[in-house]
Image (cartoon, rainbow, N blue to C red):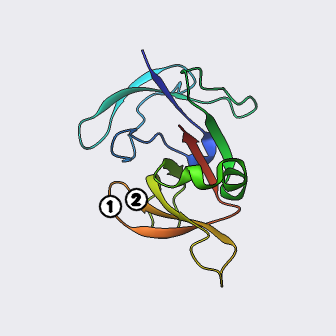
Amino acid sequence: MTIYTYTPDLMRPLCPICGAPVPQDTDTPETPWQGTCPAGHSHTFQLEDDEQEQPDDRPGVSAFSGSAGELVSAYGARLVGQRIDTARKATYPGGVAEVLQLTPDANAPEICLQVRHCATGEVIGIFQDERVRTAF
């Protein structure tokens, strides 16, 4: 059984297929629970312990949780085409987004990633200090 974890700073679990927020209807998110996104995808979720990062033990998978700038430093061009979990900001809903390019605007070096939201198609820039999460 695959358990998808999420962190308290992202505030809600996201569907690993479509990136939509999954309603949490449990009072004990620290234990695995079943959730279904609005599109009908069902998965098992668990709130990640904020003090101890849990490594992904699937073969060939690297898990990362931190700032976008740290992610770019760690993985560089390997990120293009990968999916990352982004935080909500202003009218952007947050969730799973595909990395389109690194440092999209030389005049705005604080924006280190350009991403396309997997559910809405919205394209935005991600600042270096924004919290992101990925596994690939």
Q: Residue at x 49, y 43 (%)?
A: 12
Residue type (three-letter) at the residue carrying disc 1? Thr
Residue situated in front as seen by the camera: 21 or 58? 58
**Residue lying farthest right?**
51
Q: Residue at x 42, y 35 (%)?
A: 24
- x%, y% of residue 22? 38, 40
Q: Residue at x 33, y 45 (%)?
A: 18
Quarter of the rendering containing residue 48: top right
- x%, y% of residue 94? 47, 56
Residue situated in front as seen by the camera: 93 or 117? 117
Q: Where 90 falls versus 5 (above or below)? A: below
Q: Where 109 falls versus 3 (above or below)? A: below
The answer to whether residue 123 is left or right of residue 63 is left
Q: On the rendered image, what quadrant is the N terminus found in?
A: top left
Residue type (three-letter) at the residue carrying disc 2? His
Q: Residues within 10 Å of mark 1 (few under 14, many from 20)?
A: some
Quarter of the rendering containing residue 6: top right
Q: Which residue is mark 1?
A: 120
- x%, y% of residue 104? 56, 73
Q: Residue at x 47, y 23 (%)?
A: 3
**Residue lying farthest top?**
1
Q: Where 115 falls versus 61 (above or below)? A: below
Q: Residues within 10 Å of mark 2 (few under 14, many from 20)?
A: many
Q: Which residue is mark 2?
A: 117
Quarter of the rendering containing residue 34: top left
Residue 73 is labelled as none
Element type at mark 2: strand
- x%, y% of residue 25? 40, 32
The answer to whether residue 128 is left or right of residue 25 is right
